[in-house]
Amino acid sequence: MIGELEAVVLDTRDPHRLAAFYREVIGAEIVVERRDWVTIADRQGRKLSFQTAPGHEAPRFPDPAGSQQFHLDVHVEDVDEAERKVLELGATRVPNANEDRTFRVYRDPAGHPFCLVFD
């Protein structure tokens, strides 16, 4: 082994706003907060960090000429209730995302795709 994963880092124009969004989505706490960087950690210690990227452009998904670049899967018990909450927090549903009966696709406030995954 060369090293251990420290965090997943997302570029955004507003790291504080995006951190606040994901804090609510996954029930995390802020563990580092600076002007251009915020890190949150969930109850298991998994970290997401958000860094200022003034020129950030959201992925063009599901545009076949673009890609997701990456996405986060968030497991939920009640997808309809979870959808209501993420939409209230500023997420948007991705139309025509080839969803099936186990996930729904959204964009966070900075445009990164993420899925609500359910059984």
Image: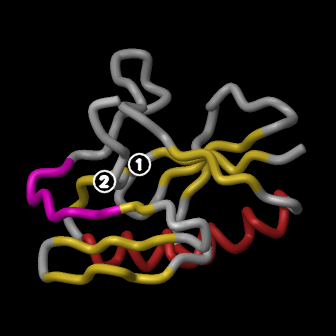
Q: Is residue 50 magenta?
A: yes
In the image shown, does 31 or 81 lie closer to the viewer?
31
Q: Are marks 1 and 2 in contact (CB under 8 Å)?
A: yes
Q: Position of residue 114 (x, y in %)?
A: 55, 47
Residue 64 sits in quarter: top left
Indicate whether 28 appears above or below 52.
below
Indicate whether 65 appears above or below 27.
above
Query: What residue is at 88 percent from the left and 62 percent from the top?
Result: 78
Mark number for residue 10? 2
Query: What residue is at 43 percent from the left and 79 percent from the top?
Result: 20
Q: CA distance from mark 1 to mark 2?
A: 8 Å
Left or right: 16 as drawn, with respect to 82: left
- Mark 2 neighbour density, 10 Å: few (under 14) some (14–19) many (20 or more): some
Query: What residue is at 22 percent from the left and 46 percent from the top?
Result: 57
Q: Position of residue 91 (x, y in %)?
A: 54, 63
Name which residue type carries label 1: His
Indicate whether 101 appears above or below 58.
above
Q: Quadrant of the N terminus?
A: top left
Q: Position of residue 21 (x, y in %)?
A: 48, 73
Q: Earlier in the sequence, mark 1 or mark 2?
A: 2
Q: Secondary structure at mark 1?
A: loop
Q: Tell me the magenta residue range.
A: 49-56
Circle 1 residue:
112
